[in-house]
Image (cartoon, coloured by chain):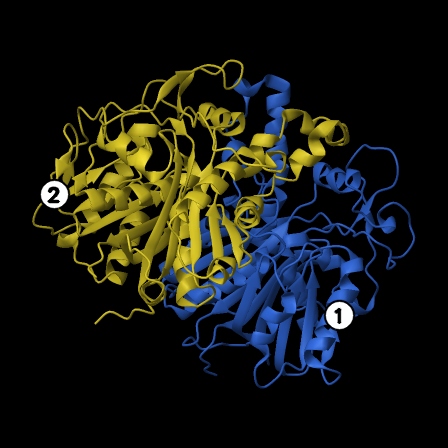
Chain colours: A yellow, B blue
Amino acid sequence: MIDAQKTIVVTGIGVVSPYGAGLSSLQAGILAGQCCLKSASDLYPGFQGTVAAVDALPSMTEVHRYSRTDRLAMAAASDSIVDFTGPGSILRESGIVMASTVAGLTEIDPEISVGPSEWYQHGGLSRAASYPASRVAASVGEHLGILGPACTVSVACASGAMAIALAANMLLDDAAPMVLAGGSDTLCPFTLSGFNSLQALDPEPCRPFDQNRKGLNIGEGAAVLVLETLDHATRRDARILAVLRGWAMTNDAFHPTAPHKDGFGLALCIQRALEMASCGIEEVGYVNAHGTGTSLNDIAETHAYESAFHGRSHPVPVSSTKSYFGHCLGAAGALEAAITIMAMQSGALLPTLRLENPIESPMIDWLRGELRRQPLPVAMSVSAGFGGSNTALVFGSHRA
Amino acid sequence: MKTTLPVITGIGSVTAYGPLAGLIPTKSLVASLEPRDITAWSTPGLRRAFLVEPFRPASIVPGLKTRRLDSLSAWALVASSLALRDANIDLGPVDRSRIAVFFATGFGCVELTLAFYQSAAANGWAGTDPIIFPETLHNAPASHVALFHDLRGPNVTISSKNFAAESALLQAASMLRHGQADLAIVLAGDTLTQAVYEWYEVAQLLAPACFNQEPLSSAPGFVPSEGVVAIVLESADRQAARPYATLGAGRWAAGGDALAGVRKLLGDPQPCLIICGSDGAPCAFRPLTCSARKLVGEGATIYPAQPVAAGMGEAGALFHLLLALSRRPASGQALLLGTSALGGYAALRLELF
């Protein structure tokens, strides 16, 4: 018996990605196997690499007040409520949980560290106002007239999925009638330079889970999911896109940047999310993996799946859609949650691009080559990040 | 003692009052805390703030290594250790995967973010420092807390315009109520750097007391402060060794009518104490106190917002709570009430022991 007041459903998805604005452009691009990763050399002097950029942002007014990260978030959030029907008070009282790691870093120059006062006095003051991470959620609220609880989660690359998990908790607490949850991050010299200094970037298009993988590519984008209880969605006659059946968060407590090589923390996270979803390991039809393409992440993640799905009668289908448009950092978990739901709705097992020599694992069905079609009643999205944080989300299809 | 609500059982802090386990001693509260002169920056003119006095973390927490960390991470490690010590918790037999860490911050690891920008200014973006980069992430302090104490539960870092600490408290309490963790360490804090201070200064947000030796007044502007406050929050079914308070319902919102939202929390019995918090200027203190009085009438005690905590901005609510508890209020129902000059509110019900 489903408790409609404790069941969290997704009733809207908004996306801005390197494919363009809207879930439909993302869906068309991914189902066609189109890769958005491109060679770039102009992101800062000396940079040579491969990235995926959002070429055109939807137009909006007063853009000077907002960072590029804010604007991506605002555009995705607007898109998420395009089909919203119901009293305006619902939207006004809704909550917002956004995720970002870059946030307003896009607006700050290195000169701030040399002479802060001078930098502020020469145009930096208004740009610095968009620096705090909290601005991402606040910008969405200002843009859409939402006055409910708002916060920004910043937990490295697990942020986007974590925002969705925390938003679900807020709904269980009746903290708001709906919560817009997602993530937004943009290409900026600070993060590109940081990952480059760590020698974590693949100069060519990345190859997640390939034995010859050489690192990650950075992308940019934003995704926002509209979450509410099944009871609330039913009462306002909303179209239900998916059920968020389970979620969990753990930490490796192992190393400031590296995941635990055996994937213990991530495996526990997956197990807890499945437990919350009352979902057996046999039921999971697809895992949208974190799959960055770095040496350490992909092997740890492989071990995590082997542990979490141990005893399953057939290999679990896994792919990384970062091979299509890179790693969107704080937005990645939200974008991949959107892709997971899209895959369920399309009945499509999405292949990892350029996966020629997968990491050997008899327990994992590495999706590659042609897109596979099959019904997907249950699918999972998995995220991890620097600092050891992991998040797993279990989605199920909704039967009215 | 058993209750059905999450219980605060430990407090640790690193603030202008120094590193402390538990409450702030009465003698420290009675003495007027004045801003200190800032000597670390080679800039002309006097500048003052509520600063954390330098100390050696390993002298407070034996074995703690903080050489490569920024102040925020180091203080988070010290404050969390002191809070666990105050809660008298032996982590040995505890399932560490059931312990969550929540960290609330406005600016995050701004010291090392600026250091990273410095390396870019000096060497170009192609020559930045790989050691510094991971430490610039907002979640670095929370992940260091997890690493040091081997805490493998949820690890969340939150920023919320005006109400980061309140958001972290509410999210942590929610996680405990829903059985996703048994215990949470909730931290809130920020560090003050020259770039942050000059931001406030150029924006003309600072109080006159920042630039002269005069005592604090009700003049517009605020005095920046820094530090980290940590609390241990335990689930209802754990035996609370020495509870300070239970955490009840809460609400927070980005905007709208503050009082309308807060009234929903008043219920029965009405709180006999309102602990006011504010994110900045003393000019916002009086309206908040007036709002609190309107809510509860003359029968309740109101603790006004304090400059030393208000200067911590988004993360100030936990500091306000520490200050209020340190004044040894009578037991009973209380409300932690925050507001901001920018609108919105946050309110949490507490039962004090």
| Amino acid type shown at disc 1 | Thr
- Is the residue at mark 1 from the same chain as the one at mark 2? no
Task: Specify the label residue A139 is tagged with.
Answer: none
Task: Give the spatial CA distance, label 1 vs label 2.
Answer: 61 Å
Task: Specify the label residue A374 is tagged with.
Answer: 2
Nearer to us: label 1 or label 2: 2
User: Is residue B91 visible in the rendered structure shown here?
Assistant: no
To which chain does the residue with label 2 belong?
A: A
Question: For the view shown, which residue lies furthest in the left direction?
Answer: A313
| Amino acid type shown at disc 2 | Gln
Tell me the residue at 28%/30% (across/down): A29
Q: Position of residue A179 (x, y in %)?
A: 44, 56
Label 2 sits on a secondary structure element that is: loop
Label 1 sits on a secondary structure element that is: helix
Is A306 displayed left or right of B99 in the figure? left
Tell me the residue at 36%/68% (across/down): B179
Residue ID for mark 1? B289
Q: Position of residue A309 (x, y in %)?
A: 17, 50
Pick the residue in front: A272 or A183.
A183
**Quadrant showing the C terminus of chain A:** bottom left
